[in-house]
């Protein structure tokens, strides 16, 4: 294991999870489609009840080598993790992590730029269970400690934030939470383990939507939560209580995606950065929200804490109206209109964060009030020049303004 961790990222992506007891003589673990696991005799059946861990056959809900190999691979990429639990979607992983940590009467602090379904979960499902969610401004470090009370038991972080891409000071926020006895859960979907290491920066649970970079091909949905000794056991118990399981076919696809995640991310990151630089020169664009871009908000913290980026960025139109934004988006030919991101193909979605923020303002202080309509791009693996030409044509289609 120690030897494995000494390797570079590319090598680790190739080696991760490929235990010979799960792969046999072939390169990839076979797809073990199984509900029932069979035992040689009643003594073997009795024996299996003593082991509740990946690597031990029991019943389909606890997975088989295909799922174990994926979980093991993700654990080996997350420094500080002893194990990883898989979920049927990223949202299920967020729910699984929050339910593992919280109980009725607890208070949860949620970053104001959280993924919208995370907010909805806090306000709906968790509120019904008697868990109170309070939102906070992730960039206001001075005000953060004031948000805590005796009952605060967890903090939910996401960096960069969904849609608006603010990079927060994860080590400082996580340290403040730990001092006050609260567990920090971080949604690390944007950077993934190659770009950011939540546990090494003080978080307790690292959550990811595998639907995005790990799957990488827009053909599967899955989530994961990785943690150290303390929380891994709770995550596992909670997921088992909820009956979460992922199909071996999807686990096999996710493992296939994982092998090429490094090269895909390098390519889409470089392309996204070039496009961000091009967007910054455009008169139609008031702000480019891309932490990898020097001068973009959050770039300093991104440089300090992150080791990689991805193809997801946003920009804000200069004083535009919604019909003009729709003309722009509808004129794009290489960007599909749709949710999700991290696939090989480029995507575009309009956004307006104002109605889904409670502690921060949109537009942020210092911006023109008219500069508020957002566009999010997920840059895929097409040629950058073709994507730029497509964007250029679509800006022309925005006229008359
Ligand atoms: C997409 C997304 C999720 C949810 O993942 P699903 O697999 O679609 O359920 C969670 N967090 C972030 C930041 C996301 O972008």
Image (cartoon, rainbow, N blue to C red):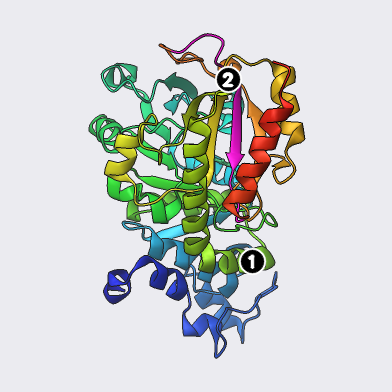
* Front in this rendered view, residue 55 or 75: 75
**Quarter of the rendered structure image containing ligand 1:** top right
Which segment did they paint magenta?
A: 367-381
Residue 14 drawn above or below residue 292: below
Q: Relative to 33, is 129 on the left or the right?
A: left
Would you say the magenta stretch is mainly helix, strand or loop? loop
**Residue 36 percent coordinates (x, y):** 69, 73
Residue holding disc 1: 253
Is residue 376 shown in magenta?
Answer: yes
Residue 154 lies in the magenta stretch:
no
Disc 1 under 8 Å from ligand 1? The reply is no
* Frontmost residue, 214 versus 63: 214
Dot 2 lies on which element? helix
Q: Are marks 1 and 2 in contact (CB under 8 Å)?
A: no
306 or 133, nearer to the observer: 306
Residue at the location (38% across, 33% down)? 167
Say which mark, if any, is on residue 126: none
Q: Quadrant of residue 42?
A: bottom right
Q: Residue at x 66, y 28 (%)?
A: 350
Residue shown at 34% from the left, 55% from the top: 229
**Could you tell me which secondary element the residue under label 1 belongs to?**
helix
Quadrant for residue 166, please give it. top left
For residue 152, side relative to residue 322 (left or right): left
Q: Is residue 53 visible?
A: no
User: In the rendered image, is residue 371 in sight?
Assistant: yes
Which of the two residues, 24 or 159, is positioned nearer the viewer here?
Answer: 159
């Amino acid at each position: 294991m120690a030897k494995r961790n000494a390797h570079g990222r590319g090598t680790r992506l190739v080696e991760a999870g490929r235990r010979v007891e799960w792969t046999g003589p072939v390169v990839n673990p076979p797809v073990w489609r199984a509900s029932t696991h069979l035992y040689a005799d009643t003594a073997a059946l009795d024996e299996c009840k003593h082991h509740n861990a990946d690597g031990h056959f029991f019943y389909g809900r606890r997975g088989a080598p295909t799922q174990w190999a994926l979980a093991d691979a993700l654990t080996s990429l997350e420094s500080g993790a002893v194990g990883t639990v898989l979920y049927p979607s990223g949202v299920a992983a967020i729910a699984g992590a929050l339910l593992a940590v919280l109980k009725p009467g607890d208070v949860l602090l949620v970053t104001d730029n959280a993924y919208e379904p995370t907010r909805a979960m806090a306000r709906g499902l968790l509120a019904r269970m008697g868990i109170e969610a309070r939102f906070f401004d992730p960039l206001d470090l001075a005000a953060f400690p004031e948000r805590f009370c005796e009952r605060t038991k967890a903090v939910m972080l996401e960096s960069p934030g969904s849609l608006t891409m603010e990079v927060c000071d994860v080590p400082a926020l996580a340290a403040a939470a730990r001092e006050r006895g609260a567990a920090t859960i971080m949604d690390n979907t944007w950077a993934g383990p190659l770009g950011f290491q939540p546990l090494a920066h003080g978080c307790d649970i690292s959550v990811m939507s595998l639907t995005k970079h790990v799957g990488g091909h827009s053909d599967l949905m899955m989530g994961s939560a990785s943690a150290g000794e303390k929380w891994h056991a709770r995550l596992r118990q909670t997921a088992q209580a909820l009956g979460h399981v992922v199909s071996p076919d999807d686990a096999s696809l996710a493992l296939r995606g994982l092998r090429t995640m490094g090269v895909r991310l390098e390519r889409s990151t470089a392309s996204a950065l070039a496009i961000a630089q091009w967007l910054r020169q455009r008169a139609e664009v008031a702000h480019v929200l891309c932490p990898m871009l020097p001068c973009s908000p959050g770039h300093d913290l991104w440089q300090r804490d992150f080791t990689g980026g991805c193809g997801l960025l946003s920009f804000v139109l200069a004083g535009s109206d919604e019909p003009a934004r729709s003309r722009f988006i509808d004129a794009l030919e290489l960007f599909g209109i749709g949710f999700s991101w991290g696939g090989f193909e480029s995507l575009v979605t309009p956004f307006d964060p104002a109605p889904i923020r409670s502690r921060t303002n949109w537009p942020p202080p210092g911006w023109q009030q008219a500069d508020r309509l957002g566009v999010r791009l997920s840059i895929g693996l097409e040629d950058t020049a073709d994507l730029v030409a497509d964007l250029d044509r679509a800006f022309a289609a925005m006229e008359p303004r």
